[in-house]
Amino acid sequence: MRPTKILVTGATGFIGSRLCELLSLAHRLPYRALVRDFSRAARIARLDTELVAGDMLDAGSLARAVDGCDVVVNLAHGDDQAAETQTARLVDVCTRAKVRRFVHMSSMAVYGPSPRTPLVTEDTTPIERWNEAYSDAKAAAEAVVRAAGKRGALSTVILRPTIVYGPFSFFVTPIVHDARQGKISLIDGGRGLCNAVYVDDVCESVVAAIHRDDAVGAIVQINGDTRITWRDFITTFADMVEGEKTVHDHSLDEISAHWRAQRPTARDSVTAALRLMGSPTFHAQLGTIPPVGKVLRGAKELLSRRITPERKMMLKRRLQGRSNPAAVPEIRPVRMPSEGRVVREAYRAWVANDLAKARLGWAPAHSFELGAQRTRDWLRFARLV
């Protein structure tokens, strides 16, 4: 189908900004960008894009944004807790407006942090609730769109991209930042599979989903064709930075032990409560309540008469901690990877893209080598390497 006008939500994000660039400069398709925070819209504002203010939780602003659009591309994903509600409100508005095509950007994360199969396909890999915030939020939002498609409310296409990289990518810039400080950080030797897909290929899958009528009802995975490990991915971009680097390899056992050590115990909670009770600041706040202040003063006077000054000082030290923090040697904790990064880089499955090729008539145009080269060009332009 040839769209009359496309509404793009999530237009100021990484994928959304690049999609707007390609819609304007390569495909010349009419579109409107939904913007919640105009301070983040500089990249797309230079395209002479039609920008419309709106919020995914405000049905009124969504209705105004959808008005006159026959295609909606939903790339928005803000807070994990609100993702399902945001998607439901957009679907409801689009249903009322009789939108002809609804393209929803989901994620490979719907399969959870560690699929139990070495090959992830749309037909054989289950979608469950994984008790991992982002995965569960993506699965819940996608379920809303799937339900609308099944009941015939909308003509839907759902895309599940993998690890999307390219200029401005969250997956690339931290690697370069570490490399500039002389560090390369790996998890489990970097042995996990990196299902990397270049951002332009993801955007072209969106365009294919808009145009192809036989794509309606499809739920497809969008991945590149180059199988690489996370070590390959990380070192490729780290090596773009000149200079010697030290490799920090975090084993999964080390990370698990660190997380266990960070969990507060019952003893920690009791100690914190006792220290709060012994805090002069806490006492001063309580003392502003006349009845409580009177009781506190009476209790302190009674305690002072019954214990020695030495015992009193010992109790203060125990309740408030050391009185001279400068005397405590500073211990710099090892910077451990975030939980999200561990989930990504411990991945062992390959995400197949065969169905996307068949249903969308799409194929990735960028090998990892080509995508990395184009990303390096941008990093040089941005003076990051």
Image (spheres, grey):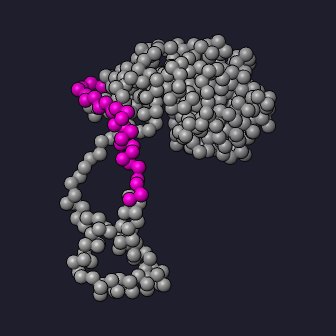
Chain part drawn in magenta: 241-267
Q: Position of residue 144 (x, y in %)?
A: 70, 35
Q: Position of residue 363 (x, y in %)?
A: 57, 13
Q: Position of residue 269 (x, y in %)?
A: 41, 60
Quarter in which the N terminus is drawn: top right
Image side of residue 168 versus residue 223, left or right: left
State the residue at coordinates (66%, 45%).
Answer: 57
Residue 14 inside the magenta-drawn segment: no
State the residue at coordinates (77%, 35%).
Answer: 95
Quarter in which the C terminus is drawn: top left
Which quarter of the picture shows residue 154?
A: top right
Residue 265 inside the magenta-drawn segment: yes
Which quarter of the picture shows residue 74?
A: top right
State the residue at coordinates (36%, 67%).
Answer: 275
> Can residue 12 be seen in the rendering of this structure?
no
Where is 352 relative to 250, above or below? above
Q: How many marks?
A: 0
Which quarter of the picture shows residue 188?
A: top left
Query: 102 or 286, which is in the foreground?
Result: 286
Q: Position of residue 5 (x, y in %)?
A: 71, 28
Image side of residue 331 versus residue 119, left or right: left
> Can residue 174 be seen in the rendering of this structure?
yes
State the residue at coordinates (29%, 31%).
Answer: 248
Where is 55 relative to 94, above or below? below
